[in-house]
Amino acid sequence: MKKILVSECLYGGKIVRYDGGDTTETDPRFVKWKEEGRLVPVCPEVFGGLPTPRPDSQRVGDKVMAQTGEDVTREYTLGAEEALRRAEENQVAFAIMKQDSPSCGSKFIYDGTFTDTKIEGQGLAAEYLRKAGYTVFAEEDLDEAEKLLEKLEQNE
């Protein structure tokens, strides 16, 4: 059975989001994969030592800055490294990560101005995973994720 790395906020059951909110994914395919035990939940920000809740953070070039002005690049880097380690340890086939996140965003992130402006880009963990050769989907890309999973399992 192929494993899938997922953002823990999508997995549900633990409050890990910066704002203490809940974004548990309820798509029937995602729920089925969870029930099958194929999902490997990760929260790079918590892995990096950041608390929940925590100040909003956004990528600014190669750095990650909190809205308070604090540079949290080190914590985000540690978290991205741990997410990648867990992907490798669990031999995941691909990842499904929370869109817009400075860690997990795979297509869009906030622009660093804290004005709710999104730009094309990726979070630090998504970047690390892609550089290591993993395909990273956003939660709205479950159709594509399902197709890839079916293809990979047919080739076993």
Image: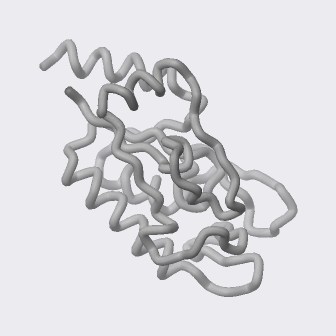
- Residue 59 image position (x, y, % from top left): 63, 67
Compared with 131, 76 (above or below) is below
- Where is the N terminus found, in terms of image quarters? top left
Comparing 132 with 1, the one in front is: 1
The residue at the far bottom in this view is: 70
Q: Position of residue 104 (x, y in %)?
A: 53, 53
Task: Name the residue: 51% across, 46% down.
Answer: 13
| 135 in relation to 75, above or below | above
The quarter of the rendered structure image containing the C terminus is top left
Residue extending furthest toward the front: 13
Percent x, y for residue 31?
47, 26
Q: Position of residue 130 (x, y in %)?
A: 38, 49
Comparing 40 with 96, the one in front is 40
* Residue at image coords 66%, 69%: 53
Task: Please give the count of numbered marks on the rendered protein.
Answer: 0
Identified at 64% across, 43% down, the residue is 23
Extreme residue in the top direction = 154
